[in-house]
Amino acid sequence: MLHWNNTRAADKVAHATPRWGEETHALICVGEMAELTSEITRKYVQGRELTDFEILEEIADVDITLAALSAFYPREALEAAIELKLNKLESKL
C-alpha cells in the first residue's frame, strides 16, 4: 500500500500488476525487502554512514512493490489486517 497519495505511481502500479502476475510481484518484493534490510544493516549494525536518500530509495522500492503485491488481495481484507496490527501497536503504547 502506497503510504503517499501519488496518482502517477498508483497508475503505474495498477498497469504493471496484471502484466507480470502475483508470483513475479512477490519475488520482486522479496528482493526489494532484502535490499532495504541490507541498507538498514549497513547503517545500524555495521555503523556505515549512509545518506537518508539511500535508505529512502529502498523504502520507496518496498512501498511500490508492496502496493503491486497487495493488489492481488481483497482491499477490505488488507484494511482489516492493517487495523488489527495498528490496534496491537496501540495496545503496546
Image (tube, helix red, strand yellow):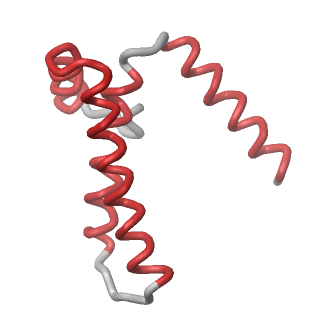
* Residue 61, percent from left and from top: 27, 48
Residue 93 is situated, as x and y percent measured from the top left of the image, at 82, 54
Relative image position of residue 8 (x, y in whole percent): 17, 29
Quick one: 18 or 9, which is closer to the camera?
18
**Pick the front one: 20 or 9:** 20
In the rendered image, the quadrant that contains the N terminus is: top left
Residue at image x 44%, y 74%? Answer: 41
Q: Is residue 60 above or below residue 1?
A: below
The one nearer the camera, 15 or 45, is 45
Q: 79 or 31, which lies in front?
A: 31
Query: Image check: 72 left or right of 84?
Result: left
- Up the image or down, 8 lies above or below 51; here it is above
- State the count of labels: 0
At a point 67% along the width and 28% down the height, the residue shown is 83
Residue pictured at 44% horizontal, 86% vertical: 46
* Left-right relation of 69 to 91: left
Relative to 71, residue 90 above or below: below
Q: Quadrant of residue 57?
A: bottom left
